[in-house]
Image (spheres, rainbow, N blue to C red):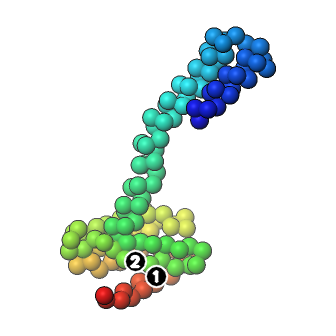
Amino acid sequence: MGGTFLLVSQYLQLVEGHSPLRAGLLLVPRAVAMIGATTLTPLLAWSAAAAVLLLQAGAGLYPDVPAGRVEVRPLAGAELGALSVDRFRIAGAPVGVQVDRTGQASVTGLPANLRLTDPSPTVPH
């Protein structure tokens, strides 16, 4: 991104005929926008993805909409306590997941085209 400032300033001076001062002033709005974007990016990334991933991992809800299945493998239970997630959107439908203190999960509101599958068995080592 920083290299584009050099290239654009050279273009403005050599091709468009602007003075170095004018070319620099023309790039100020872009610099301000870049500062704002890089300041807000971590906040937007956290709010957009991390919260959903934490809820997904805690509730253990792993949807595979193209394959038509949803797997439940909750992390919540004895170690984390009970967990309840409401209006978690899967295939456009609000789905609810409740995990009790023992780790037993129940899913409500699953769309008709999705089926709940058992997690694949783990092999003890």
Q: At 42% across and 42% down in the image, what residue appears?
A: 43
Q: At 48% across and 36% down in the image, what residue appears?
A: 38
Mark 1 burial class by Cα count in 10 Å: few <14, some 14-19, many 20+: some
Q: At 20% across and 74% down in the image, what residue appears?
A: 78
Residue 103 percent location from the top left of the image: 27, 77
Q: At 50% across and 82% down in the image, what residue appears?
A: 115
Position of residue 80 in the picture relative to residue 26 (left or right): left
Mark 2 burial class by Cα count in 10 Å: few <14, some 14-19, many 20+: many
Report how far apart the C-alphas of labels 1 and 2 lie in the structure.
8 Å
Q: Residue 89 carries which label?
A: none
Residue 102 percent location from the top left of the image: 23, 79
Above-or-below relation of 34 to 76: above
Viewer-proximal residue among 75 and 84? 75
| Dot 2 amino acid type | Val
Please say whether residue 86 is visible from this viewpoint.
no
Q: Quadrant for the N terminus, please.
A: top right
What secondary structure is found at the residue carrying circle 1? strand
Viewer-proximal residue among 97 and 18? 18
Please say whether residue 53 is visible from this viewpoint.
yes
Position of residue 125 in the picture relative to residue 17 (left or right): left
Question: Mark 1 — residue?
Answer: 116
Above-or-below relation of 16 to 8: above
> Residue 97's quadrant in the figure?
bottom left
Looking at the image, is mark 1 or mark 2 nearer the viewer?
2
> Residue 74's quadrant in the figure?
bottom left
Residue furthest to the right in view is 15
Q: Quadrant for the C terminus, please.
A: bottom left
Above-or-below relation of 13 to 88: above
| Dot 1 amino acid type | Leu
Q: Do the residues labelled 1 and 2 touch (CB within 8 Å)?
A: yes
Q: Residue 72 carries which label?
A: 2
